[in-house]
Image (spheres, rainbow, N blue to C red):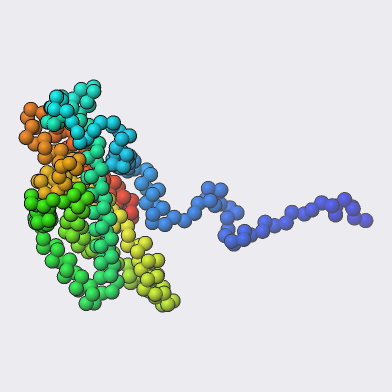
Amino acid sequence: MSDPSASLVSTPRPEQPSETGAPTAGLPESAREQQPRGLLGDAWRDLRRKPLFWISATLILVFVLMAAFPWLFTSGDPVNGDLAHSRVDPSASAWFGYDVQGRDVYARTIYGARASIMVALLATIGTLLIGGTMGMVAGYRGGWVDSLLSRIADVFFGLPFMLGAIVILTTFNGSGTDNSESQIMGLVIVSLVVLLWPVVMRLMRSSVLATKEADYILAARALGAGTGRIVLKHLLPNCVAPLLVYGTIMIGSFIGAEATLSFLGIGLKTPVVSWGIMISEAQNYIRVSPYLLLFPAAFLVTAVLSFVMLGETVREALDPKLR
């Protein structure tokens, strides 16, 4: 007779396969939880390991906070001053000293970040939108559309940037005009966008031409996907990486361009507080009061280098050949 207790002992059953059918039984737990990453995921994983990325990102965050919330950094008045403090050297009460009109240089340097970064950011957004859209249309449509848009871009390429900006701003923002602060900023932004959108257009066009014949684009077109879906779902996500890199570097370039135009007296003007205006006002006192030029110039150079360094690190992370 068989032992009745043996029927109460359950025999081990073989391990059932997972619902997904993936052979994960022999893999370690970390390998099971690891998910496939896309281009941006790989880029972020690479960026986190770069000290230069964290340094530039921290500096940019500080400048953005200065532009958005300057009262967090200073309680001084950047516009009004006391002539009794004219060209007083830096001290404990005034870290950066006072300018010719007795205004706090530290407060003006902090508030100067607002105009410079706002102009650079809005000009970059406008340039990327206009140039990116025209480059997408030219690269995807091809034919006479591509030829027409490329010839229009060539016309703007023939205009030297600084000369074109001087002509535009002198015409609409000359000494005889009476523009408000917002109108002057708008003219500077428009001049930057008008003169530099062809660079973004060509960059986007080359990316689209290299991507539109890929297998997944042909497969989507064969499955009946429309132009809008192909552009928004397939082309744009795979062509936007070069624009992100160039846009980051462009912000730093536009900060320097705005300061240059303001220094020449054709960009932003007083009572707007800008690093370029401060440098322009300090050029006559560089020998007797060099701090008037030193501090705004140092902030300007640091801001430009921060955006350029961030753009370079992002470019290295998004380009597999540079890893």
Name the residue at 26% across, 57% down.
126
Spot the residue most to the top.
Answer: 92
Q: In x, y percent, where is residue 215?
A: 38, 71
Residue 70 drawn above or below residue 30: above
Along the viewing direction, whichever of 103 and 8 lies nearer the viewer: 103
Question: In the image, 42: left or right of 113?
Answer: right
Residue 4 x/y as whole percent: 90, 53
Left or right, 11 with respect to 278, comes to: right
Q: Residue at x 15, y 38 (%)?
A: 278
Please say whether residue 185 is visible from this viewpoint.
Answer: no
**Quarter of the rendering containing residue 137:** bottom left
Q: Nearer the viewer, residue 13 or 272?
A: 272
Q: Residue at x 13, y 27 (%)?
A: 83
Q: In this rendered view, identify the residue nearer to me: 74 or 193.
A: 74
Say which quadrant the N terminus sits in: bottom right
**Left or right of residue 82, residue 234 in this image:** right
Q: Residue pushed farthest right?
A: 1
* Residue at the image point whose x is 18% and y is 60% from the top: 194
Percent position (x, y) of residue 310?
Answer: 29, 46
Residue 285 visible in the picture: yes
Q: Which quarter of the picture shows residue 243?
A: bottom left
**Vertical side of 309 occupied by 101: above or below:** above
x and y percentages locating residue 241 in the rendered image: 32, 57
- How many numbered marks appear? 0
* Vertical comparison of 164 with 215: above or below: above
